[in-house]
Image (tube, helix red, strand yellow):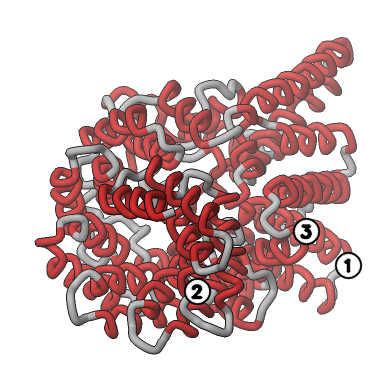
Amino acid sequence: MTRNTHVRGGLTQPGLEWALTSGEAANWFPVTRLSHMLDSQFFGLRGGLHHLTSVWWHALAGVLLFAFLVRSTHARWPSAWVAFLFALHPLHVDSVAWVAERKDVLCAFFWFLALWAYVRYAERPGRGRYLAVLLWFILGLMSKPMIVTLPLLLLVLDAWPLRRLSRKAVIEKIPLFALAAVSAVATFLVQQSGGAVKEIARLPIGLRMENALVSYAIYCLKTIWPSGLAVFYPYPPGFEWWIVAAAGLAIAIVTALALRSFRSAPYLAAGWLWFLVTLAPVIGLVQVGAQARADRYMYVPMVGLAIMLAWGAADLARRWPAATRPIAAAAIAACLAAAAVSAAQIQHWKNSETLFQHALDMTTDNYLAEHNLGSYLLGAGRLSEAMPHLEAALRIRPESAPARSDLASALAQTPGRLPEAITQYQAALRLLPDSAILHNNLASALAKFPERLPEAIREYQAALRIDPDYAEAHHNLGLALAGIPGRLPEAIAEYRAALRIQPAYAEAHYNLGVALSKTPGRLPEAAAEFEAVLRLKPDYAEAHNNLGVALSQLPVRSSEAIAHFEAALRIQPDYADAHYNLGVALSQIPGRMPEAIAQWEESLRLQPDPDLRRAIDRLRAGR
C-alpha cells in the first residue's frame, strides 16, 4: 500500500479515477481504496494513524452490530455479548491489525448498517428505507464483495428474528440478488484476469471440497478455542479420509439439529445459517489465493456462531433460573479470555519478522511464511539469515517465481555468487515471463559483467515493452547505455524518460547530470540536474562534489564550487575525490596553496596515488 503512488498522493483526480476503475491486485473495491487515499491525505504515511483508522471503523462496526441486534431482537444482554465478542475475538485481529485488510472493517461497517436499515424497513416498509438498504449494500460491495451473501442473510433474518418470511419478502430481495450477481461475476472476472483464481488443474475440485468441509469445522473450533492462529495457512496436499468424513458428519448433524429445533429455538438455525451462508464465498470452492483458510474470513461469519451461543445461553437461563449466575460468569470469562488472547495475538504484528516467524511456529511447510520472512530479513540486510528461509520456500514450492526472485536478490548481494543469482532470475522468468520487475532485476545482475552489457540492455528493453512507464528500468537502461562508447545520447534520453514518469527520482537526476557533464557544451544543464538532486536529497555527498566540479568549470559560478566541495566533506569526511577537487579549487586562489596541498595530502591518505604523490612533492620542493 505504501508503495502505491495513487494512495501515497492522497485525493487527486488521477487517484480518484484509478480507485473507481482499477482491478489492481485482482480486486475492485473503490471505497476501500478511497479510504486509504483519505488516510494519506490527512496523515501522510504515519502508520500509527492508518492503524487507528482501521480500529475506528472496527469499533463502529461493533456498535452497529449491537444496534442491529437490539433493534431486531429486543434482547440487550445477548446482543451486547455478541458485539463484545465481535470487537475483541482473536480471529478478528488480522482484519484490524493488517492495514491492507481495511476492506474487511469497511465491508462489515456497511454490512451491519444495511442490516440495521433493513430492520427499520421491516418495521415500516417504504421506498426511502428500501433505498437505504440498497445504498449500504452497494457501498459494502465496493468495499469488499464478500457481502454478496447479504440478500440470503436477509431471508434468514426474515425467518428469525423478524418473523416476516413470505413470498413477498423473497420478491422484494430481487434487486439485491441482481446486484449480488453482477458483483459476483465482476469479481470473478477481475480476480481471474489478475491471476488470483487458481486453475482446477492445480487444486482439483475434489480437494477443494474436502478443504471446504474441514475448514468449516476448523472455523467452528477456533471460534470456541482460538489457538494456533497464523496469518497464512498453506494449502495441504490432501486430507485423511476420516478427517473429511468427521468434518462433513459434524456439519450435517449440526445443520439437521438446528433446522429441526427451529420452532423451539429459531436462533440456532438463524445463527448456523448466518455462519454457513456468509462464509460460502471464501470457503474455497472457487479458490482465490493460495491459502487453505484465513482467520480474517471469519470477520462477519463468526457473528452467527456467537448468536447461537448468546441466545442459547439466555434461553437456558430462562428455563433454569439457577443457572443464571454461572452462565453470566462464563460469559464474562469468555470475553476476558478473548481480550487476553487478542492482546497476545496483536504482539505478533509488531513487524514482518515476528508475524511470519509465528506463522512458521504454528504451521508446517508454510512456503509463504518462509518466503516473506526471508524477504523481510533480506530487506533488513541480514543476508545470512534470509538465505535459509528463501531456500526453504523453494524446497516447498519450487514453482514460486517471487521466492526465486528474492533468492536471486540475496545471491546477487553475496560476494562470488552473482552467476547463481543470474541463474535464479532466469528460472523465475521461465515461470513468470511477463514480469517487468524480473527482467529489470536480471538485467541489473547481467550489467555487473561488462561483457554482458548487451544482454542486460535487451532485458531492460524487454521490461519496458511490458511496462513502458517503469521509471527504474528506464534509469537502469540509461546506466547500461552510458557504459558503452558512443551511446551516451541514448542514455540521456532514458534518464529523461525516467524523470518524465517520476520527476522526484533523485538517482535519475544525478546520473543525467553525470552524462550531461561528459557532453561538450552541456555543463549548465548538468549543474541544474545536480541542483535538482540536492533539492530532493540535501545530504547527497556525490551530488555536492559533482556540482562543485561543474561549477568550477563555469566562470560565472566558479566561486560557488568550494562551498559544495566543503558540503560534500561535511557529509562524508573520508571522500577522497572531494578532498582532491577542493584542493584543485583552492589552488586557483592566490595565497591558498598551503590549504590546497593539505586537501591533496588528505586525499592521498585516503586513496594512494603515485602521480599525486609526485605532484605534491614537486610543489613542496618548489616552495
Residue 400 location (% of width, % of height)? 25, 47
Residue 321 location (% of width, % of height)? 88, 15
For mark 3, what is the residue? 113
Q: Does the image show residue 142?
A: no
At mark 1, the secondary structure is loop
Alpha-carbon distance for marks 1 and 2? 83 Å
For mark 2, what is the residue? 552
For mark 1, what is the residue? 124
What amino acid type is highlighted by mark number 2? Ser
Q: Is residue 208 above or below residue 177?
A: above
Q: Is residue 277 above or below residue 123?
A: above
Q: Residue 286 lies in what quarter of the image? A: bottom left
The answer to whether marks 1 and 2 mark residues whose Cβ atoms lie closer than 8 Å is no
Q: Residue 533 lies in what quarter of the image? A: bottom right
Residue 347 location (% of width, % of height)? 63, 27
Q: Does the image show residue 552?
A: yes
Q: Residue 371 lies in what quarter of the image? A: top left
Q: How many marks?
A: 3
Alpha-carbon distance for marks 3 and 2? 68 Å
At mark 3, the secondary structure is helix
Mark 3 is surrounded, within 10 Å at the Cα level, by few (under 14), some (14 to 19) or many (20 or more) other residues, namely many
